[in-house]
Amino acid sequence: MAKAVSGLVSKGPSLLKGFIDSATPKYHLFVKYAKVELAPPTPADIPQIRSGIQKLLTGFRTGKWKEATVKEAWLDSLVTAEVVFWFFIGECIGKRSIVGYHV
């Protein structure tokens, strides 16, 4: 047993270096995308948001939503369900602890 532990301790630094070397590029890619995706909208984004909402409302009024393919409708349903579930988690479950209500 002591021999196995001493072998693991001797290989520890090289295993740790290998882990760090393989994880570093993935971490940098995560940070790159997180900076873009998690950033709040800027005032420059407001015209794009406004035009997107206008397109959505126009499509709803003209009945364009009836021409959606099954794949598009399924994906839209999944996104809607995700938003509703996260809203439920944030509003209902987030206000309680495991034992009861927060004081």
Image (spheres, helix red, strand yellow):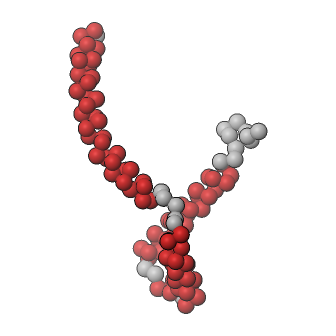
Residue under the image location 55 percent in, 78 percent down = 50
> How many numbered markers are drawn?
0
Q: What's the residue at 36%, 54% (across, down)?
A: 32
Image side of residue 102 versus residue 66, left or right: right
Does residue 83 lie above or below 10 as drawn?
Answer: below
Image location of residue 89, percent across then percent down: 62, 52
Relative vertical location of residue 20 with respect to residue 31 in this rendering, above or below = above
Residue 31 or residue 56, whichever sits in front: 31
Quarter of the image that includes the C terminus? top right
In this rendered view, identify the residue nearer to me: 101 or 78: 101
Residue 100 position, x and y percent, is 73, 39
Which residue is depicted at the point 44% across and 75% down? 72
Q: Residue at x 37, y 50 (%)?
A: 30
How far across and down, in percent of the image, does residue 69 sit?
43, 79
51 left or right, relative to 24 = right
On-image quarter of the N terminus: top left
**Residue furthest to the right:** 103
Q: Kindly tell me whether residue 25 is visible in this rendering.
A: yes
